[in-house]
Amino acid sequence: MHIAKNSSPDRSGQRPRARLSLWVATALGLVLLTFVVARAQPRANDDPTFRKLIDDYCAAWSTGNTDNAGKFYAQDGDLIFYDVTPFSYHGWKEYVPGVHKALLDNAAEAKLTAGKDLKVTRRGNVAWTVVPMHFYEKTKDGKVMEAELRYTGIWEKRGSNWLLVHEHVSVPMGEN
């Protein structure tokens, strides 16, 4: 009869397994941490995309034709847009006649220009942009109106297009 000297499990076999388990857990943790950090950081390639969108948006509004600007907006009827006047518009169908009445009907010339300080934040298929803007308008009777604006746009990616689902335009109190 043979009796083993040590009836406990072989420790030399446990150490390599424990090290392997620790190594796998550490590697998995590092991969997950890298993924989390990468998702939390803004995408560097979004800034040029949204710079072009904002500049094209301003050029479209500068034509004085709401049809040109319409391609930047989601057309859902339940969306709300805040402009300098009036308080709000409910959907694009309300926005068009409101902007014409408030700003475009009496304009001989209009120009909207985005400032350089564009900030883009993106989470998946939703992004928001914040940028100062300058508005210039010469009315049909020769009066000139200029205003420094604060602009925030909430964009949603629908298909291959980024569309505005909300925007907020305001003039700082006490200015202009």
Image: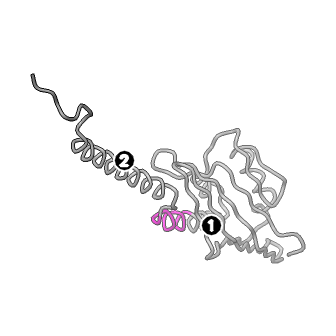
What span is colored magenta in the figure?
A: 44-53
Asked whether 74 or 139 is in front, the reply is 74
Magenta highlight: main SS = helix
Residue name at image x 84 percent, y 53 percent: 87
Residue 137 vs 30, above or below: the answer is below
Name the residue carrying label 2.
Answer: 25
Q: Which mark is residue 99?
A: none
Which of the image's four quarters has the C terminus? bottom right
Q: Quadrant of residue 38?
A: bottom left
Q: Residue at x 17, y 31 (%)?
A: 4
Q: Secondary structure at mark 2?
A: helix
95 to the left or right of 76: right
Residue 46 among those drawn in magenta: yes
Question: Which kind of residue does numbered mark 1 sit on?
Answer: Cys
In terms of secondary structure, where does tag 1 sit?
Answer: helix
Q: Residue at x 62, y 52 (%)?
A: 164
Q: Residues within 10 Å of mark 1 (few under 14, many from 20)?
A: some
> Which of marks 1 and 2 precedes in the sequence?
2
Q: How is the image coloured?
A: one colour
Relative horizontal placement of residue 63, taking residue 51 as reference (left or right): right
Quadrant of the rendered structure where residue 139 is? Answer: bottom right
Q: Position of residue 11 (x, y in %)?
A: 25, 42
Q: Quickly name the residue at label 1.
A: 58
